[in-house]
Image: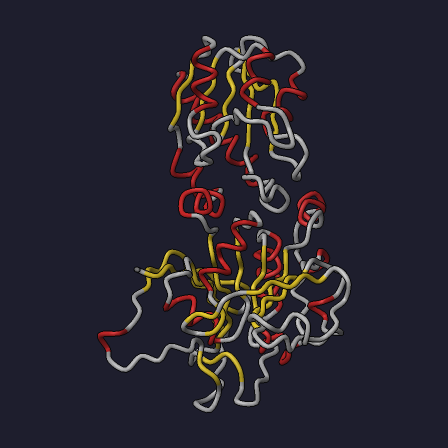
């Protein structure tokens, strides 16, 4: 096998390992690492939960002796000290002779410094192998580092005629068990789940990850159960009941409201945070919300709400992806529409790029991105 073929094969394996950390590595990017010497894998690893080992340390620990080895990493080894030490220094101390990275770290605290440190110490360095594939593994982290806010995805469920709830508000269940299981996995991969108080009042939703509904293998289920995403409720007037399921101790909760209501609202359970946001053109300032979530290191934000909030995010250019589950049912013209978009002319229509379409049980899942 040629060196180029071996490099590609080992980086593909590192990417496979990286995906194992997608449920628990946040707010860190989930990274994979493979150590190879004389054509044989001597160590593998992927990012552990926050505060734990990075992928490189896991691989070095497995290898024991990594002198003269090549390290394949899906993201540039870090050069700064956070909760753990710099991985670039750990690779140097282990005597690794070559490092192949899929991409530079977009984090300004690293941004090429890790590779430069290795190269200055005499390690052979290359970067860019399978870079597009690596970027697809950690899109939320890349977005937060490059533009100051994470990736925002909206989950929607509709009938074949594009309806999401009956006129009364009744909406459970439009889709089948397989689609709902898929949504549980989306939640598990998210740093935050965002909804509006209307959805809380109508559905009394918990918005938690339920391990027994994930349908994953035991190891993946265990990883997905390490942490619960932050539940974020947009509630201008602080109408969320203290006894609502979204306020339970099962997961952290942040309730966002307008100014002047902190003292006059309901007494919320201990552990439920509140956040004052300024008013925007369509209620609470959504751009300010995204900035606040970025400050909390939220890479992936999943929106599970009614048509108004999703429509507002789309109109304000804050929505990166729509994930739409379509059930083979008809709900009629009196039922509620998929999105609240006050468009009058054909020229105002919102163009989407369909990136994926697949069957999920008896339903279909469409993934689309807005063409801003």
Residue 201 at what x, y percent from top left? Answer: 64, 79
296 or 119: nearer the viewer: 296
Q: Residue at x 42, y 59 (%)?
A: 321
Q: Residue at x 59, y 71 (%)?
A: 176
Q: According to the image, what is the colour scheme of the structure? A: secondary structure
**Quadrant in the rendering for residue 36:** top right
Quadrant in the picture for the N terminus: top left
Quick check: 59 above or below 193?
above
- Relative placement, left or right, of 121 versus 228 is left
Residue 238 at what x, y percent from top left? Answer: 63, 75
Q: Residue at x 60, y 40 (%)?
A: 21
Residue 38 at what x, y percent from top left? Answer: 52, 10
214 or 227: nearer the viewer: 227
Q: Residue furthest left?
A: 347
Quadrant in the picture for the C terminus: bottom left
Quick check: 194 above or below 65?
below
269 or 249: nearer the viewer: 269
Residue 338 at what x, y percent from top left? Answer: 44, 76
366 or 287: nearer the viewer: 287
Q: Residue at x 45, y 8 (%)?
A: 122
**Quadrant in the rendering for residue 129:** top left
Count of marks overlaid on the render = 0
């Amino acid at each position: 096998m040629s060196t180029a073929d071996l490099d590609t094969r080992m980086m593909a394996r590192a990417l496979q390992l990286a995906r194992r950390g997608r449920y628990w590595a946040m707010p860190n990017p989930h990274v994979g690492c493979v150590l190879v010497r004389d054509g044989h894998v001597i160590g593998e690893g992927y990012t552990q939960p926050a505060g734990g080992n990075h992928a490189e340390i896991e691989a070095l620990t497995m290898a024991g002796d990594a002198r003269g080895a090549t390290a394949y990493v899906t993201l540039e080894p870090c050069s700064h000290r956070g909760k753990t030490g710099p991985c670039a220094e750990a690779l140097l101390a282990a005597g690794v002779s070559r490092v192949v990275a899929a991409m530079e770290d977009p984090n300004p605290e690293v941004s090429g410094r890790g590779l430069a440190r290795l190269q200055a110490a005499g390690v052979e360095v290359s970067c860019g192998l399978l870079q597009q594939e690596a970027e697809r593994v950690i899109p939320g982290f890349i977005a937060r580092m490059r533009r100051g806010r994470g990736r925002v995805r909206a989950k929607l469920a509709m009938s074949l005629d594009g309806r999401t709830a009956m006129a009364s508000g009744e909406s459970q269940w439009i889709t089948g068990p397989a689609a709902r299981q898929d949504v549980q996995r989306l939640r598990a991969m998210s740093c935050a789940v965002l909804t509006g108080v209307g959805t809380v009042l109508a559905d009394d939703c918990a918005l938690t990850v339920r391990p027994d509904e994930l349908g994953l293998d035991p190891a993946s289920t265990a990883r997905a159960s390490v942490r619960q995403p932050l539940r974020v409720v947009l509630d201008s007037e602080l109408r969320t009941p203290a006894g609502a399921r979204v306020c339970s101790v099962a997961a952290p909760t942040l309730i966002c409201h307008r100014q002047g209501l902190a003292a006059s609202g309901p007494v919320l359970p201990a552990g439920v945070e509140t956040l004052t946001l300024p008013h925007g053109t369509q209620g609470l300032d959504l751009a300010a919300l995204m900035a606040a979530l970025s400050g909390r290191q939220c890479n992936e934000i999943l929106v599970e709400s009614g048509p108004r909030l999703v429509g507002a995010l789309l109109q304000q250019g804050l929505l990166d992806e729509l994930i739409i589950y379509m059930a083979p049912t008809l709900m009629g013209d009196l039922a509620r529409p998929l999105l609240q978009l006050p468009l009058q002319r054909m020229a105002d229509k919102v163009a989407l790029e369909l990136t994926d379409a697949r069957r999920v049980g008896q339903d279909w899942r469409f993934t689309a991105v807005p063409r801003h």
